[in-house]
Amino acid sequence: MELFFTTLASALAGFVDSIVGGGGLILLPALFAVYPSTAPATLFGTNKSASVWGTAFATWQYSRRVQVRWSALLPAAATTMVAAFAGAWLVTLVSPEFLRRLLPVVLLVVLIYTLMRKDMGRHHAPRFHGRAELLATSTIGLTIGFYDGFFGPGTGSFFVFLLVRWLGYDFLNASVAAKLLNLSSNIAALILFTMKGHVWWHLALPMAMANVAGSLLGTRMALQHGAGFVRGMFIMVVSALICKTSYDAFLR
């Protein structure tokens, strides 16, 4: 029964994550609910070992249908991976507790701004090209990658928002780019958790298969319905993140 519940949660997480990020909002609470006495690091590592495959397949599926700006995003992905490692290392020395109360406020600002700018992210009109775009994407990768390694919640949403607001991508193209960057930070975290022995591989395999199945379904729906659908999912996920992070920060 435990395996069925976590596998179902992994499939749903893959579906949501493939569209706009935020799969951890579903899978991590499920793991903590089923295995409450397990070390958090093990549950984080097991979550990454499943979600990284769904993210990888979503990235591959998107790249077949959407023109990916590889020249700008591959260096940014490498920057993201290095920054995520640095953030994960720093969290072993400094507590990220101060971010817990700040995060819901930042997410609320993102949500309000998105709701006020109704046309934001509906049309794909990149503002930068060449070296300028490379610098912008690498800056995003460096900043959010470090945040992902150090703290983590809302990483996919922050990637999407910055790519839409700063670089002028529409929500669909931003989601594709965010998948590649998020994949890099997830790989970095998974390597670290594996080296520390914090992955339950017997649970990771069925969860990974379910995550990929959900991811493929979510990717197909995003490609079919376009930027408007992804924008709607973005608003839903950020709203849920605000509720979850507010509860963790002020009520727990």
Image (spheres, rainbow, N blue to C red):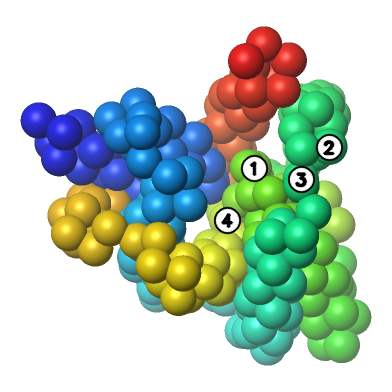
Marks 3,2: beta carbons within 8 A? yes
Looking at the picture, which amino acid does disc 2 mark?
Phe
Q: Which residue is mark 2?
A: 98
Q: Residue at x 76, y 60 (%)?
A: 93
Q: Which residue is mark 4?
A: 175
Looking at the picture, which amino acid does disc 3 mark?
Pro
Q: Residue at x 28, y 58 (%)?
A: 200
Residue 119 to residue 198: above or below: above
Crowd rating for badge 4 (residues with CA inside 10 Å; few <14, some 14–19, many 20+): many
Residue 78 image position (x, y, % from top left): 66, 83
- Quote the CA–CA distance across marks 2 and 1: 16 Å
Comes first in the chain, label 2 or label 1: 2
- Asked which secondary structure carries label 2, the reply is helix
Label disc, if present, on residue 154 of the rendered structure: 1
Quarter assignment of residue 153: top right
- Asked which secondary structure carries label 1, the reply is loop
Q: Which residue is mark 3?
A: 96
Hey, which residue is sitting farthest right in the picture? 132
